[in-house]
Amino acid sequence: MRIVGIELEGFRGYLTSSYVSIDTLTVFAGKNDAGKSSILEAMRLFLDKGKPDVSDYSVHGHGTIRITCTFADLPPELVIDQTAVTTLQDEKLLDANGHLVISKTWTRGRANPEILAHALHPVVDGGPTLIGLKHAQLKSLASTLDVVAELEDRRVNLNYRQAIWRAWEAKGLSSLQPTIIPLNSEDGKHVASALESVFPLFHLFQADRLGAESDEVAQDPAKLIVKAVLDRHTAELTKLTSDVKAEISELLLEVVGKLEEFAPNLAAKLIPANLDPVWQKAFSSLQFVDENDVPLAKRGSGTRRLVLLSFFRAEVERGYEETDEWRRGVIIAVEEPETALHPPTCQGWVRPVANSKSAV
């Protein structure tokens, strides 16, 4: 998966919409305070599921930050729940160029961003997009169009969407139009979650990073390795999570049932919560140590960065070897030092961004 463009609005100095094209190797060069670092930080915010700081909102803005990324070299399929395998094309989530365009909008004071897809999508008289409808709503619409009988599996939402779209097209009711599709509820939320697991791996190497032992670069190699492996097993982990949650919920209900026999008021107030595991935390203790059991966090910052860079090289070169397998992509961003550290003849900073599924 490869990023081919990024658009910023309301982020730091980018008050109004600004679009930047990204190629396999991209270099940003310019004077201090031109906004080069902001582009790389925006990539990190978008791809690493980050949260903006208060100072990231443009001073004269409206309290919102919108970052839009355009992707090519897309995954051949997408698993949006434990059984439903689909594609971005079948879900009508691609633009006129066959690209995936996703925007995230953060609003000051809100924890999570609004996630939207911008695509050529079937619409009928300005009605809602199907991907945001609940199962009952899809079933009702399919019944109105008399297409329920043709469904092989009536439990899967994407089957209803496909049947409804075919019926609309046959009746001349819909047309493909540029559409903004919310991905924060129902199957849209599942699509957004699945996309997060296939977005390119990203890391920003900053020359002015602090060298303290608490520096996150000490932990990043191990964390990124765990994340990369877990993302490859998203479908299996989703199914395992669903099975375990169902078993836990069943047991909890039995416990509440027994409690209700002698403490009904207490039992009525008990409900299961926080059943979704964070798999990466299960491997949070993973770290590198040398032959003397000295952890990487205690080594010099240069050594730590070499390990981190080696991880990215290994990920990229694995893409060369597995030519028949789709690769999620790797983005390595390197920010060079302040201009004051260069000779007087140097014209500005240089920030190369390597962005490819098979090359640095």
Image: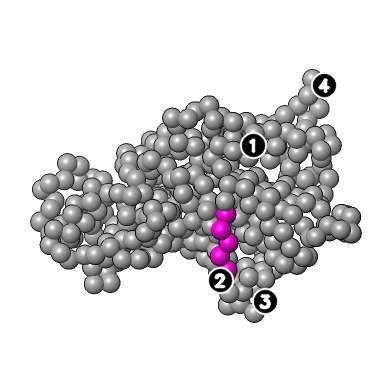
Query: In front here: 68 or 29?
Result: 29
**Label 1 to label 3: alpha-carbon separation:** 36 Å
User: Is tag 2's residue or tag 4's residue first in the polypeptide sequence?
Assistant: 2
Name which residue type carries label 3. Val
Name which residue type carries label 2. Ser
User: Is tag 2's residue or tag 3's residue first in the polypeptide sequence?
Assistant: 2
The residue that label 1 is drawn on is 312
Circle 2 crowding by C-alpha within 10 Å: few under 14, some 14–19, many from 20: few
Discs 2/3, front: 2
Residue positioned 31% across, 66% down in the render: 177
Q: Magenta residues, as a range?
A: 18-22
User: Is tag 1's residue or tag 4's residue first in the polypeptide sequence?
Assistant: 4
Residue 360 picture quarter: top right
Disc 2 is placed on an element classified as loop
Numbered label attached to residue 59: 3
**Label 1 to label 4: alpha-carbon separation:** 26 Å
Numbered label attached to residue 292: 4
Outermost residue toward the top in this view: 291
User: Is tag 1's residue or tag 3's residue first in the polypeptide sequence?
Assistant: 3
Residue positioned 33% across, 41% down in the render: 85
Circle 3 crowding by C-alpha within 10 Å: few under 14, some 14–19, many from 20: some
Residue 21 picture quarter: bottom right
Place of residue 30 in the rendered image (x, y in percent of width and height, measured from the top left): 74, 63
**Label 3 to label 4: alpha-carbon separation:** 51 Å
Disc 1 is placed on an element classified as helix
